[in-house]
Image (cartoon, rainbow, N blue to C red):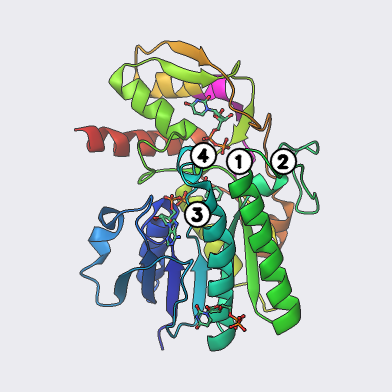
C-alpha cells in the first residue's frame, strides 16, 4: 500500500525536491501550491508520473482531501517575498497551519511543519539549541515571517496536546541549491547571479554577519527521517549545516568557484538582520542519526551549475 502524502508549497524550492524524493520512494504525492513564489516548472518533470497530482490551492483556505501524511511547507521564505504582502505572510503561516492541522485531525494524518531558525530571531545564545526561546522583534519588518512561524509552532503543539495529533516540527536553517528562485534576494542566489553576470557583489553591512548553509539534498534527508521517527517524538529539531561563514567569506568562495571578476560593493544592513546563526544539531544526530554530508564548496558548485544553465 502506497502512502498518500500532501506537500503544501510543493512547487517551491524545497517542496519540489521533497516531492521528487517521496515519489522516488514509491509514495503517492499531492502537491498543493498557489504559485506565489513557486512554479509549475519546478515540478514539470514530475507531471507525467501517475502518482503525482498538482493542485492550485492557497492554504489559507480549507482543503478537504484524504491523506496519510502532510508536509506543511507553504510560505514564502525570502525576505523580499515575505515582505511583499506581510499580512498574507502571517495568514499563510497561521491560517495555513490551522487548516492543515484541521485536515490532519480529521483524517488522522501525521503532520510535519517546516519551521525556521528565524524563530530564534537575532540570538544571544550561539550556536542555537532547540531549548533556546529566541529574541524576536514582534513589530519589525521580519515579524510577519518570524512571528507567523512561531505561532504556527504554537498551534502544532496545542493540536498535539489538545487533540493528540501526531506532529513533527523541523527548524530549518538557511538552505540552498538548484531551483532556488534566482531573484528572491537571498544571499546565495544573489551572489551567484551577480558573479555569473560580472556585476558587483552586494554585501549588506560590513559582511561580518554569519550564516550556516545547508545543501538541499541534506535537508530533504533530514525531513524524511524526522517524519519517520516514532510517534510521540515531536521535535522541534534543528536541521542545518553547522559550517558557519561570514558573508564576506561566502562572497569570496562564490567569486573563486565562478572565476568571476566581480568586485564587492557595500550596502546598508537591513533592519533586524541577525548577526550570527549556527545550528546546534546534536538532537538531529541523536534522534535521526542525521548530519549534513555536502560541504559548502561542493554544494555551491552544483548550485552554480544550475544557475549557469538557467541563464544559458
Ligand atoms: P519557496 O518560496 O521556494 O517555497 C514556498 C512555496 O510555498 C512556494 O511554492 C509558494 O508558491 C508556496 N506558497 C506560498 N504561500 C502559499 C499559500 N498561501 N498557499 C499555498 N502555497 C503557498 O521557499 P522554500 O525555500 O522552498 O521554503 C519552503 C518552506 O521552508 C517555507 O515554509 C519556509 O519558511 C521554510 N524554510 C526555508 C528555508 C530556506 O533556507 N530555504 C529556511 C527556513 C525555513
Ligand atoms: N479543515 C480543512 N480540512 C479538513 C478539516 C478541517 O481544511 O479536512 C480546516 C477547517 O477550515 C477548520 C480548520 O481546518 O476551520 C480547523 O479545523 P478544526 O477541526 O481543528 O476546527 P473547527 O472546524 O472546529 O474550527
Ligand atoms: N545579504 C547580503 N547581500 C545580499 C543578500 C543578503 O549581504 O545580496 C546578507 C543579509 O543581510 C543577511 C545574509 O546575507 O545577513 C543572509 O540573507 P538571506 O536573505 O539569504 O537570509 P536570512 O537573512 O533570512 O538568513
Residue nearest the observer in this picture, 288 or 155? 155
- Left or right side of 123 for 298: left
Element at label 3: helix
Q: Which mark is residue 279?
A: none
Marks 4 and 1: CB-CB under 8 Å? Answer: yes
| Residue drawn 37% across the image and 73% down it | 30
Determine whether the beta carbon of the residue marked 4 sits less than 8 angstroms from the nearest atom of ligand 3: yes
Q: Which quadrant of the rendered structure holds the C terminus?
A: top left
Marks 2 and 3: CB-CB under 8 Å? Answer: no
- Depicted 168 relative to depicted 283: above or below: below
| Residue drawn 37% across the image and 13% down it | 262
Marks 2 and 1: CB-CB under 8 Å? Answer: yes
Q: Residue 20, how many percent across, how many down?
A: 36, 63
Which residue is labeled 4 in the image? 79
Q: Based on the displayed image, in which of its 4 quarters is residue 52 positioned?
A: bottom left
Q: Based on the displayed image, in which of its 4 quarters is residue 310 positioned?
A: top left
Label 2 vs label 1: CA separation? 8 Å
Determine whether the beta carbon of the residue marked 1 sits less than 8 angstroms from the nearest atom of ligand 3: yes
Label 2 vs label 4: CA separation? 15 Å
Q: Residue 150, how many percent across, how many down?
A: 68, 56
Determine whether the beta carbon of the residue marked 3 sits less than 8 angstroms from the nearest atom of ligand 1: yes
Which residue is labeled 1 in the image? 142
Which residue is labeled 2 in the image? 137
Marks 2 and 4: CB-CB under 8 Å? Answer: no
Label 4 vs label 1: CA separation? 7 Å
Give the mark nearer the N terminus: 2 vs 4. 4
Q: Which residues are magenta?
A: 241-250
Q: Which mark is residue 88?
A: 3
Amino acid at each position: 500500500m502506497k502512502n498518500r502524502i500532501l506537500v503544501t508549497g510543493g512547487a517551491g524550492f524545497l517542496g519540489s525536491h521533497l516531492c521528487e524524493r517521496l515519489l522516488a520512494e514509491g509514495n503517492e504525492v499531492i502537491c498543493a501550491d498557489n504559485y506565489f513564489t513557486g512554479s509549475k516548472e519546478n515540478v514539470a518533470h514530475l507531471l507525467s508520473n501517475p502518482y503525482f497530482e498538482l493542485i492550485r490551492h492557497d492554504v489559507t483556505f480549507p482543503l478537504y482531501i484524504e491523506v496519510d501524511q502532510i508536509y506543511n511547507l507553504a510560505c514564502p521564505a525570502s525576505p523580499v517575498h515575505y515582505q511583499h504582502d506581510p499580512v498574507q505572510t502571517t495568514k499563510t503561516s497561521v491560517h495555513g497551519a490551522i487548516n492543515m492541522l484541521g485536515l490532519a485531525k480529521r483524517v488522522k494524518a501525521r503532520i510535519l511543519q517546516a519551521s525556521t531558525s528565524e524563530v530564534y530571531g537575532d540570538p544571544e545564545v550561539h550556536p542555537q539549541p532547540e531549548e533556546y526561546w529566541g529574541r524576536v522583534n514582534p513589530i519589525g519588518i521580519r515579524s510577519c515571517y518570524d512571528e507567523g512561524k512561531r505561532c504556527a509552532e504554537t498551534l502544532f503543539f496545542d493540536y498535539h496536546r489538545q487533540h493528540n495529533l501526531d506532529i513533527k516540527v523541523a527548524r530549518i536553517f538557511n538552505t540552498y541549491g538548484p531551483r532556488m528562485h534566482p531573484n528572491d534576494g537571498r544571499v546565495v542566489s544573489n551572489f551567484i547571479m551577480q558573479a555569473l553576470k560580472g556585476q558587483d557583489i552586494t554585501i549588506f553591512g560590513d559582511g561580518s554577519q554569519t550564516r550556516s548553509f545547508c545543501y538541499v539534498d541534506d535537508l530533504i534527508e533530514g525531513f524524511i527521517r524526522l517524519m519517520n521517527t516514532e510517534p510521540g517524538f515531536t521535535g522541534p529539531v534543528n536541521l542545518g549545516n553547522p559550517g558557519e561563514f561570514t558573508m564576506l567569506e561566502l562572497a569570496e568562495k562564490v567569486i573563486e568557484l565562478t572565476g568571476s571578476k566581480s568586485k564587492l560593493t557595500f550596502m546598508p544592513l537591513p533592519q533586524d538582520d541577525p548577526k550570527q546563526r549556527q545550528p546546534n544539531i546534536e538532537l538531529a544526530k541523536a534522534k535521526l542519526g542525521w548530519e549534513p554530508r555536502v560541504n559548502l564548496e561542493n554544494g555551491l558548485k552544483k548550485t552554480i551549475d544550475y544557475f549557469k544553465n538557467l541563464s544559458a
